[in-house]
C-alpha cells in the first residue's frame, strides 16, 4: 500500500511481548553512609493517554502547565527502605495510597528522605523519617520542578529550601484567543554565530509571557513542621546552599530572551543571599549566549561554574576564560580558577590555571582540591592537585590522559560525608582511594586503590576476578571498616548487591535477591566476538544466537540482524579497546535488537563502528569509507565462524545509528533490509554542525552532501523501514527529516515504509507506541529476511 493510511496499534508476537511487558525489579539506591538501601518501583512505560496531557513547548523544553514538571516525566510508583545491617525491611507508615515520586534526596545527616510526590495534579513536598518510620507532607506549597530540582536540604537537616509555584502560573495566555498585532521579526548581527538546530523555541510575545509565568518560582525556607519563610521570587534555575547553611547561591534566568536558542543560553544572574542579614550580593551577570565563538569548547567570558568549597563554611569557587572563550586562540592555559570567601567583599584569589577547559573540582578533609579539565578536540583531560590554603605549594598534574583510553583510566576518588553532610575526598590526609571500572584487554576487573596524591604511590587493596560473573563497585560503605557494596550480575542473572570486607573478599553478605524477569533469556547463546577491519583496527561485537541449533526456516544458516551506533575517535588503538563483558546481564529494553534472537535470528549488537581521524584528515572526511569497512568486517567475521547467511543480513540503528543505516544502504550492497529510527538524513538541514562535526556546511559543502543519504536517494534501492516520533524534540532529528527522506525514496521507487508514532518524541515512552514499533520491526524482518513465509 503506497497511500497514507492509519493502522490501530499492534502487538508483537508473544516471544517479544513477554519480554517487553516483563515487570522489572525495583531500582536500588544505597545512601552514602552505606546504612540503607532505598528500593524504588519504576514505571516502565507511560500510558498512551499521558502523551496527550497538556503540554507547552517553550524555550527548548516541554512543559506540563498543570503539574509544573517537564511533560512526559517518569515517576517512581513505590518505595521501600532496607537497613543494610541485618537486612531489615522498614515498614513506612503514612505514605500516599497512590504514590508517584518525582525526586528523592537524603538529608545531610541521612536520617530523613525528602520526596516530591505528585498528589492529583500538583507536586508536594513529603519527608520520610527513617527513625520513626513515618512519612508526612511537610507543606501545602505546590512545587515548581521545571528548571531544577524543586527542593534542597539545609545542612541542619531540619529544613529545606523549596521552589514553589507563583499565582502567575494559573494565568496563561491561550494562543487560540490571541490576534497578532504585527509580524514576528528577527534581526541579524555582524558577529558570526553558530547554533545547532534547536527545537521548541520561543516564537512570539505570548510564548515569552507564558514561559515567564510558568518557570518563575518563589524560593522559601520550609521547616519540617511546616513553617514557611519567603526569600525571593525569580526565574530560578539553580540553588546551591553553603556548607554552613548561611548563604544561598541562586542562578536566575533574565531577559532579554531569544527565539533562536534554548533557555540555558539566555542571560542569567548569579546572586548570593545572606540568610543571617537578609542581604544579597550580585556576583555576575552573563549576557545572552547567542554569539559565542565557533567550536564545542567555546564559552562566554564572564565568571562561570560557581560552586561551594565543600570543606569550608562559605567559600565559593568559580572559573573564567583566559582565551576570551575562543577555542581557536593559541594560549598556554584556557581557564583560571578562583576562590572567593564570604562575605565576598574582597578580591577573589586565583588558585589554579588549567591547560584545558575547567570541568569540576573535589575537595578533601585535608584542604587540598582535585581539579579536572577537558578538551573535546583531543579528548585530553588533566587532573590537578591544588592546595590553595598553602599558596607556597605549587599545583601539579596527577593524571594526564585521553578520556577514550579506558585501559588507562585510574578511577575516580572515593568520597565520604563531612560534618556538613557534603561529599569530600575520603582517606587520611594525602592517602586517598581510587575506585575504577578496571577495563583491560583481558576483561573488566573493577578495583580499589589506595593512592597518595603527594607521592603518587598506589597500592591495590581489592580487585574483582570476574571469571564467571561481572562485579562492579556500587559504593565504598566504610573506609575505616574496609567494606564495599558490590553489584553482581551474569548473562542470565539480574544484578544484585552484596557487602564484603576488602581484606576478606570471599565472605559475601547479600543485600538483595532480585529474580530475572525475562523468562527464557538463559536459552540465548551470548558471546563477544573480536576481529579486525581492513586497516587493522580492532573491532568487537556482542553476538546472540537462538536457543535451537536450527534456523527459523529450518535451514542451516541464520538470518542476521546487526545493530550499531557510530562513535568518533582520535586514535586507532583506543578505538579498538574492548569495553564490554560477556558476563553483563542481557537486558531486552525497548530499543534492543536482542528480542529477535528469540525469534530465530542471529543478532549482532553493539557492533564497533569507529570513525577515526587520521593525520590531517578529520574523522568525517572518510565517514562513508569507514562505515563500509566496519560493516564488511563484522559480517565477514560473524559468517566465518557461525552458521549465518551473509545474503540475509539486516542493519538497524536509532538516531545517529539511523543515519548510519541509511548511508550503509545507500553506499553498500551488504544488506537486504534496514531499520532506521528517529534519524536525520539531510545534513544541509543541520548546517552548523552535527554529532562531533564542528565544521559548517559552508566550510565543507562536499562533505555535507556526501554524508546526506537524502542527496543520494536515487542510489538507495534496499528495503528500508523508517520509524520516527511525530513530535521529536532532539536537536537535528526533526520529524521532517524522515518525512522528506520518505517522500524522496517513494517518488524514486524505493521499497520504503514510514511509521510515525503519534505524539512520541525522540525516545518512545508509551507502551502502545513501543509495542507497535516492535511489531513493525518484526514484520519488516520477517518479510525481507524470511521471504518464503510471507
Image (cartoon, rainbow, N blue to C red):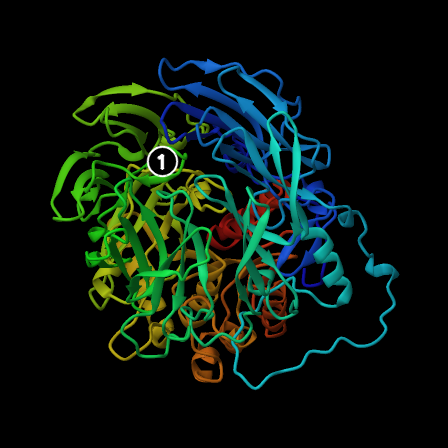
In the rendered image, the vertical position of residue 403 relative to residue 314, given as above or below: below
**What x and y, as percent, mark residue 342?**
44, 51
Report the side of 43 relative to 440 (left or right). Answer: right
Please state, as top left, top right, bottom left or bottom right, where the N terminus lies in the image: bottom right
The residue shown at (71%, 61%) is 4
Q: Which residue is mark 1?
A: 585
**What x and y, as percent, mark residue 277?**
57, 45
Q: Is residue 21 visible?
A: yes
Where disc 1 sits, the SS reads loop
Decide which of 212, 314 is in the foreground and name it. Answer: 314
Decide which of 783, 336 is in the foreground and name it. Answer: 336
Report the side of 464 relative to 331 (left or right). Answer: left
**What x and y, as percent, mark residue 546?**
37, 39
**What x and y, as percent, mark residue 92?**
55, 17
Decide which of 240, 554 is in the foreground and name it. Answer: 240
Report the side of 54 relative to 754 (left or right). Answer: right
In the rendered image, the vertical position of residue 697 relative to residue 108, given as above or below: below
Q: Is residue 758 visible?
A: no
Q: Quadrant of residue 254?
A: bottom right
Q: Quadrant of residue 205?
A: bottom right
Count of marks overlaid on the render: 1
Decide which of 485, 123 is in the foreground and name it. Answer: 123
Characterize the local packing of mark 1: few (<14), some (14-19) or many (20 or more) Cα atoms within 10 angstroms: some
The residue shown at (33%, 48%) is 362
Amino acid at each position: 500500500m503506497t497511500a497514507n493510511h492509519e493502522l490501530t496499534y499492534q502487538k508483537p508476537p508473544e516471544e517479544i511481548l513477554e519480554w517487553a511487558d516483563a515487570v522489572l525489579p525495583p531500582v536500588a539506591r544505597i545512601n552514602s553512609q552505606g546504612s540503607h538501601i532505598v528500593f524504588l518501583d519504576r514505571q516502565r512505560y507511560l500510558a498512551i493517554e499521558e502523551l496527550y496531557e497538556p503540554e507547552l513547548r517553550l524555550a527548548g523544553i516541554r512543559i506540563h502547565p498543570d503539574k509544573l514538571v517537564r511533560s512526559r516525566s517518569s515517576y517512581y510508583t513505590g518505595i521501600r527502605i532496607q537497613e543494610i545491617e541485618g537486612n531489615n525491611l522498614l515498614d513506612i507508615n503514612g505514605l500516599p495510597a497512590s504514590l508517584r515520586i518525582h525526586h528523592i534526596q537524603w538529608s545531610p545527616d541521612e536520617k530523613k528522605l525528602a520526596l516530591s510526590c505528585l498528589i492529583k495534579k500538583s507536586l508536594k513536598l513529603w519527608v520520610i523519617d527513617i527513625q520513626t518510620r513515618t512519612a508526612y507532607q511537610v507543606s501545602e506549597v505546590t512545587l515548581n520542578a521545571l528548571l531544577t530540582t524543586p527542593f534542597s536540604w539545609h545542612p541542619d537537616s531540619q529544613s529545606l529550601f523549596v521552589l514553589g509555584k507563583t499565582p502567575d502560573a494559573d494565568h496563561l495566555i491561550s494562543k487560540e484567543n490571541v490576534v497578532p498585532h504585527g509580524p514576528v521579526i528577527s534581526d541579524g548581527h555582524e558577529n558570526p554565530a553558530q547554533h545547532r538546530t534547536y527545537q521548541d523555541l520561543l516564537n512570539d510575545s505570548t510564548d515569552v509571557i507564558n514561559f515567564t509565568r510558568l518557570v518563575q518560582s518563589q524560593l522559601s525556607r520550609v521547616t519540617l513542621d511546616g513553617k514557611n519563610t519567603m526569600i525571593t521570587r525569580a526565574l530560578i534555575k539553580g540553588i546551591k546552599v553553603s556548607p554552613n547553611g548561611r548563604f544561598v547561591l541562586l542562578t536566575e534566568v533574565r531577559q532579554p530572551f531569544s527565539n533562536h536558542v534554548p533557555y540555558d543560553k539566555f542571560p542569567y544572574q548569579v546572586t548570593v543571599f545572606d540568610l543571617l542579614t537578609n542581604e544579597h550580593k550580585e556576583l555576575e551577570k552573563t549576557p545572552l549566549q547567542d554569539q559565542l565563538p565557533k567550536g564545542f569548547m567555546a564559552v562566554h567570558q564572564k565568571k562561570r561554574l560557581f560552586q561551594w568549597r565543600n570543606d569550608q563554611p562559605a567559600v565559593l569557587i568559580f572559573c573564567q576564560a583566559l582565551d576570551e572563550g575562543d577555542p581557536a586562540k593559541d594560549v598556554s592555559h584556557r581557564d583560571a580558577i578562583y576562590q572567593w570567601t564570604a562575605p565576598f567583599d574582597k578580591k577573589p584569589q586565583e588558585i589554579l590555571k588549567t591547560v584545558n577547559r575547567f570541568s569540576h573540582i573535589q575537595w578533601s578533609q585535608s584542604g587540598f582540591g582535585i581539579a579536572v579539565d577537558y578538551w573535546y578536540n583531543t579528548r585530553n583531560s588533566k587532573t590537578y592537585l591544588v592546595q590553595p590554603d598553602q599558596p607556597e605549594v605549587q599545583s601539579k598534574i596527577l593524571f594526564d590522559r585521553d578520556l577514550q583510553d579506558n585501559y588507562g583510566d585510574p578511577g575516580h576518588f572515593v568520597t565520604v560525608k563531612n560534618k556538613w553532610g557534603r561529599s569530600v575526598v575520603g582517606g587520611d590526609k594525602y592517602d586517598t582511594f581510587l575506585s575504577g571500572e578496571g577495563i583491560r584487554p583481558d576483561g573488566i576487573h573493577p578495583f580499589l586503590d589506595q593512592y597518595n596524591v603527594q607521592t603518587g604511590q598506589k597500592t591495590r587493596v581489592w580487585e574483582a576476578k570476574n571469571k564467571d560473573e561481572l562485579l562492579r563497585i556500587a559504593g565504598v560503605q566504610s573506609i575505616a571498616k574496609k567494606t564495599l557494596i558490590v553489584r553482581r550480575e551474569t548473562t542470565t542473572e539480574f544484578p544484585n548487591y552484596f557487602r564484603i570486607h576488602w581484606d576478606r573478599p570471599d565472605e559475601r553478605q547479600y543485600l538483595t535477591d532480585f529474580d530475572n524477569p525475562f523468562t527464557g533469556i538463559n536459552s540465548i547463546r551470548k558471546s563477544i566476538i573480536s576481529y579486525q577491519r581492513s586497516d587493522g583496527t580492532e573491532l568487537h561485537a556482542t553476538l546472540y544466537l537462538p536457543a535451537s541449533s536450527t534456523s527459523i526456516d529450518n535451514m542451516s544458516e541464520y538470518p542476521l540482524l546487526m545493530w550499531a551506533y557510530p562513535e568518533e575517535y582520535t586514535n586507532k588503538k583506543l578505538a579498538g579497546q574492548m569495553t564490554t563483558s560477556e558476563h553483563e546481564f542481557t537486558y531486552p529494553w525497548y530499543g534492543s535488537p536482542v528480542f529477535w534472537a528469540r525469534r530465530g535470528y542471529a543478532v549482532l549488537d553493539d557492533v564497533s563502528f569507529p570513525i577515526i581521524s587520521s593525520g590531517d584528515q578529520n574523522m568525517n572526511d572518510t565517514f562513508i569509507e569507514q562505515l563500509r569497512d566496519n560493516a564488511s568486517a563484522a559480517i565477514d567475521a560473524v559468517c566465518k565462524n557461525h552458521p549465518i547467511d551473509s545474503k540475509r543480513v539486516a542493519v538497524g540503528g536509532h538516531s545517529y545509528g539511523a543515519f548510519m543505516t541509511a548511508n550503509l544502504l545507500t553506499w553498500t550492497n551488504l544488506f537486504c533490509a534496514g531499520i532506521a529510527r528517529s534519524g536525520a538524513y539531510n545534513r544541509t538541514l543541520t548546517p552548523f554542525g552535527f554529532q562531533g562535526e564542528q565544521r559548517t556546511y559552508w566550510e565543507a559543502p562536499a562533505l555535507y552532501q556526501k554524508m546526506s543519504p537524502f542527496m543520494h536517494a536515487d542510489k538507495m534501492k534496499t528495503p528500508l523501514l523508517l520509524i520516527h516520533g511525530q513530535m521529536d524534540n532532539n536537536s537535528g532529528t526533526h520529524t521532517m527529516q524522515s518525512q522528506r527522506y520518505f517522500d524522496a525514496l517513494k517518488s524514486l521507487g524505493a521499497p520504503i515504509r514510514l511509521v510515525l508514532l503519534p505524539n512520541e518524541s525522540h525516545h518512545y515512552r508509551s507502551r502502545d507506541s513501543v509495542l507497535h514499533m516492535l511489531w513493525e520491526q518484526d514484520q519488516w524482518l520477517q518479510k525481507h529476511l524470511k521471504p518464503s513465509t510471507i
